[in-house]
Image (tube, helix red, strand yellow):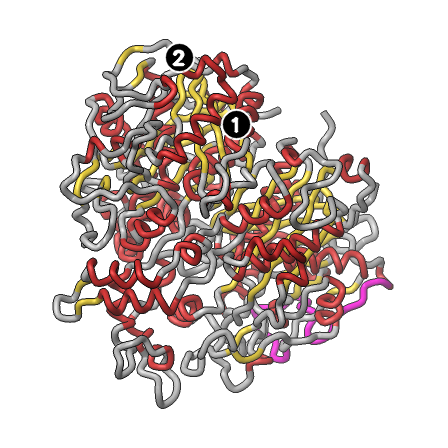
């Protein structure tokens, strides 16, 4: 028999702060974390705003014995490690990484899985540049022979990189560090599908629990694009607004507004504790929401769209949504709110709006859309799990947060500026589409 | 509801030993090494200046006119397109790349790859990094970096490095619209991809999946990373014998590159459309070591768990002989990288999972010949398991001349083993373990109706 799956812990780290409450309160204010980038010198980039996570301290999120290992964590890994600890504490789980004398349910390692979506993590240009600058020829150009360490022409340039240099940037490191900190010995994966990574991980964790492969999974995604290479690629991918550091942060990202200048790069991680509902009940855990349905589908035309040919999404996103609805055993008319990608890049938002309209028809204009990118930018591989965190909190609190919007959404979509409000919610849809054409959708259901 | 069984109906390869499955197989059986000097770039001063490269690759020969639509894609994506076209053709899904599937709803065909990132634009990236490094202030001058980056880093080359672009391009070439994923669990990725793809089919989320992986890290940054980790062999004086899994003198792995893609399918679906099941994907196991990012759990707990899970799903008790009195799994295709640590611990893990049966099975590593195809390794090795089942022959572990007392199983040293006299090969495991501790095993079984 298939196990039912619920969300029992939320670990959200975003520009709005550390923890699910910080995210929720920021969305309700509503407040935007978008502002000038302070973490690196972005002065040469065309998009110079970002949503940075304030006050991140990974050393406090790991046991003392693991603090040394934080030196080989890139920002994406730090975000995930902090978020995973929050998820464990929120779920009342006692793992070897969360204990510190905490009370809680002690879970066996082999019943604990870990699926964390990630992006292609760029090597720090300073770390690499410093080493590469030691291996240049007379003209100042990089010399591959000087980079090596064997023979007359070698100058050992690569030896200026720490031995563990590459391990810092492997996309599976967020999941690997989290498995080590918390002792997750069950199934573990790292899905790398750009903006769809988080939701695909949540779906995979749900399937693993459903078939009995684990009782609990840390699941979600993490990413920081707030580095030179990350922002350059996001800009090349048509995701970013060209805005200087003086622009008003809260006014930039305008979901579904044809006049939106684009999105803004963010950083963040959402790690949820997904758990078998029977298991959660047996230990008396709170269930934020049930993961009632999951669907995934591919848009074959997406690759062409990156290069300006075609609209990209085809029917991929609507296929994924339909499949998630079918998996949940409900019809489109039963969805009470949607937490979409809504990055603020006009072409992407239009394609997303079209996909939603295909599924929901005229009723789409009546469905509240919960947008978070005007507040926290785009956290790419981490974004979907932050969307899902918000969706789960909406269901648990029976509330919708506020929205920021400095323009006018097209087609009467309910994405304009508003205040938080009470709402009767039974089903919330969360969806995402990726550069590269992967689409994922999750239906969350109010916990019974 | 009866259990949905998963069978393999198509296989495609791009490897350092060739690109047609039969040819690669014959070279493996003959004990051929694919390892030689690095020719992709000037590696003359690198501590490891050799690798197993794919030679003479021609995308157009593999996928015809469709190649024109994928010129900008990265090398590993090209490998994946070629391997997928071969698997697609063998499975009889349609005329080939550039045309959709015939007689199958494209929404029921998914993709699950463990494709690696595309090769970086090293020359131009380096130029930006050097221009951006302000040696006096000891920090990056963002303006200087960006000026060179905008000038020299192209949109196409940057975006095609994204690891999910390979999935996107396969979907475009073959018209697949079902569930699509890409995972990057380092050296375990394509075994994980095949395993998770089989779960998609078992649950009914798809009827057909293109699954496998593609990767090339034979570029300056990839080689640098592993040299700094001291994970690769530095036997510069004798590359052909540098990959020595299970040998006492092994000093690290040898980098390879390529792609392995399979078509897997729900059994009834395959039979209904007249496809031939080549083997059954009978089980899958996944675990994490949860130990250290640089070291494997010393007892091989995670590896043993992955093998046990794969056997359990296949309905096999690994500690008991099969009905013919043989080991319940006749061939375990080892992760077998040729590092001191992996081979020792993987051997211990096989002992832990199989008990006394460990001494009756064959446990060899084709990485001794092909090198380590990193994210593509698992799927390529899975295909060698299918060939072992089809032929009854187990490929050798080359360069194993000085047995390591801690690697004390039957590693098929030097010469291929013909098991036909003892009933052939019916069940194999294919192991893949990733840096950082993610472990995967797939169980492949002879298809019987």
Q: x%, y% of residue B79?
A: 59, 60
Image quadrant where residue A287 sits: top left
- Whether residue A385 is visible here, answered yes or no, is yes
Q: Looking at the image, which is closer to me, A110 or A375?
A: A375
Q: x%, y% of residue A121?
A: 36, 53
Q: Residue at x 53, y 80 (%)?
A: B37
- Whether residue A91 is visible here, answered yes or no, is no
Q: Residue at x 58, y 32 (%)?
A: A211
Q: Are marks 1 and 2 on the same chain?
A: yes
Please, which chain is the residue tagged with disc 2 on? A
Q: Residues within 10 Å of mark 2 (few under 14, many from 20)?
A: few
Asked whether residue A265 is drawn in magenta, I would say no
Q: Which residue is drawn at 50% across and 47% down?
A: B183
Residue A318: which numbered mark, if any? 1
Q: Is residue A356 above or below residue A246?
A: above
Check the picture and name the quadrant holding the C terminus of chain A. Answer: top left
Q: Is the magenta region chiefly helix, strand or loop?
A: loop
Residue A366: which numbered mark, if any? 2
Q: Give the range drawn in magenta.
A: B400-420
Residue A179: which numbered mark, if any? none
Check the picture and name the quadrant holding the N terminus of chain A. Answer: top right
Say left or right for A359 vs A48: right
Q: Residues within 10 Å of mark 1 (few under 14, many from 20)?
A: many
Q: In this view, does B212 lie above or below B28?
A: above
């Amino acid at each position: 028999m298939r196990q039912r799956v619920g969300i029992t812990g939320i670990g959200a780290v975003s520009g709005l702060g550390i923890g699910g409450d910080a995210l929720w309160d920021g969305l309700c204010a509503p407040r935007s974390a978008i502002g000038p980038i302070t973490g690196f010198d972005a002065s040469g980039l065309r998009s110079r705003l970002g949503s940075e996570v304030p006050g991140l301290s990974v050393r406090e999120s790991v046991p003392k014995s693991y603090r040394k290992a934080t030196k080989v964590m890139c920002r994406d890994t730090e975000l995930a490690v902090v978020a995973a600890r929050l998820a464990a504490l929120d779920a009342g789980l006692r793992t070897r990484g969360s204990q510190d004398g905490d009370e809680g349910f002690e879970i066996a390692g082999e019943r604990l899985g870990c699926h964390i979506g990630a992006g292609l993590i760029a090597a720090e240009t300073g770390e690499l540049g410093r080493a590469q600058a030691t291996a240049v020829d007379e003209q100042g150009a990089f010399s591959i022979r000087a980079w090596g360490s064997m023979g007359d022409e070698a100058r050992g340039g690569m030896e200026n990189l720490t031995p563990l240099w590459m391990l810092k940037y492997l996309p599976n490191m967020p999941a690997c560090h989290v498995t080590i900190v918390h002792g997750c010995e069950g199934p573990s994966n790292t899905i790398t599908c750009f903006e769809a990574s988080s939701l695909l991980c949540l779906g995979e964790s749900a399937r693993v629990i459903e078939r009995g492969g684990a009782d609990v999974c840390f699941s979600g995604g993490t990413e920081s694009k707030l580095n030179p290479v990350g922002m350059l690629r996001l800009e090349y991918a048509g995701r970013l607004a060209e805005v200087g550091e003086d622009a008003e942060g809260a006014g930039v990202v305008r979901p579904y507004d044809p006049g939106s200048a684009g999105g803004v790069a963010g950083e963040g991680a959402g790690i949820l504790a997904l758990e078998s509902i029977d298991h959660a009940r047996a230990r008396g855990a709170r269930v934020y929401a049930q993961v009632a349905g999951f669907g995934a589908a591919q848009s074959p035309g997406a690759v062409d769209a990156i290069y300006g040919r075609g609209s990209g999404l085809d029917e991929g996103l609507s296929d994924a949504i339909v499949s998630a609805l079918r998996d949940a055993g409900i019809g489109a008319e039963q969805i009470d709110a949607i937490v979409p990608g809504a990055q603020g890049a006009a072409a992407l938002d239009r394609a997303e709006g079209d996909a939603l309209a295909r599924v929901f028809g005229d009723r789409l204009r009546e469905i509240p859309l919960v947008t978070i990118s005007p507040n926290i930018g785009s956290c790419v591989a981490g974004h979907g799990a932050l969307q899902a965190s918000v969706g789960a909190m909406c269901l648990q609190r029976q509330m919708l947060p506020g929205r920021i919007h400095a323009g006018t959404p097209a087609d009467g979509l309910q994405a304009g500026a508003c205040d938080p409000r009470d709402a009767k919610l039974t089903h919330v849809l969360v969806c995402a589409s990726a550069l590269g054409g992967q689409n994922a959708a999750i239906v969350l259901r109010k916990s019974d | 509801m009866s259990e949905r069984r998963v069978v393999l109906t198509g296989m495609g390869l791009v490897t350092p030993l060739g690109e047609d499955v039969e040819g690669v197989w014959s070279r493996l059986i003959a004990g051929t090494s694919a390892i030689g000097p690095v020719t992709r770039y000037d590696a003359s001063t690198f501590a490891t200046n050799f690798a197993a490269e794919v030679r003479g690759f021609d995308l157009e020969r593999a996928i015809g006119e469709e190649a024109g639509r994928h010129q900008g894609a990265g090398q590993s994506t090209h490998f994946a397109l070629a391997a997928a076209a071969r698997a697609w053709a063998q499975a009889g899904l349609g005329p080939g790349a550039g045309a959709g599937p015939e007689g199958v709803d494209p929404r029921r065909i998914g993709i699950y790859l463990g494709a690696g990132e595309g090769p970086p634009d090293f020359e131009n990236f380096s130029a930006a990094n050097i221009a951006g490094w302000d040696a006096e202030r000891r920090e990056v001058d963002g303006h200087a970096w960006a000026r060179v980056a905008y000038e020299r880093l192209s949109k196409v080359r940057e975006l095609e490095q994204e690891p999910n672009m390979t999935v996107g391009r396969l979907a475009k070439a073959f018209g697949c619209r079902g569930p699509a994923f890409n995972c990057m669990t380092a050296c375990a990725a394509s075994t994980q991809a095949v395993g998770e793809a089989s779960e998609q089919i078992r649950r009914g989320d798809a009827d057909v999946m293109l699954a496998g992986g593609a990767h090339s890290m034979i570029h300056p940054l990839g080689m640098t990373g592993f040299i700094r980790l001291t994970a690769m062999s530095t036997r510069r004086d004798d590359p052909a014998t540098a990959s020595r899994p299970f040998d006492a003198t092994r000093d690290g792995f040898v980098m390879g590159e390529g792609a392995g893609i399979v078509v897997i399918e729900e059994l009834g679906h395959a039979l209904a459309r007249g496809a031939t099941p080549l083997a059954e994907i009978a089980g899958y196991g996944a675990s994490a070591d949860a130990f250290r990012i640089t070291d494997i759990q010393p007892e091989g707990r995670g590896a043993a768990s992955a093998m046990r899970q794969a056997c359990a799903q296949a309905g096999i008790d690994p500690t008991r002989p099969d009905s013919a009195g043989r080991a319940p799994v006749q061939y375990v295709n080892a992760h077998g990288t040729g590092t001191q640590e992996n081979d020792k611990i993987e051997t211990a893990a096989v002992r832990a999972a199989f008990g006394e049966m460990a001494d009756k099975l064959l446990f060899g590593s084709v990485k001794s010949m092909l090198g380590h195809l990193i994210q593509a390794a698992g799927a390529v090795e899975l295909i060698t398991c299918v060939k072992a089942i089809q032929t009854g022959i187990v490929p050798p572990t080359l360069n194993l001349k000085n047995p390591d007392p801690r690697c004390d199983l039957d590693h098929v040293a030097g010469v291929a083993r013909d098991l036909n006299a003892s009933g052939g090969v019916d069940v194999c495991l294919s192991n893949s373990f990733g840096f950082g501790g993610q472990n995967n095993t797939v169980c492949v079984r002879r298809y019987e109706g």
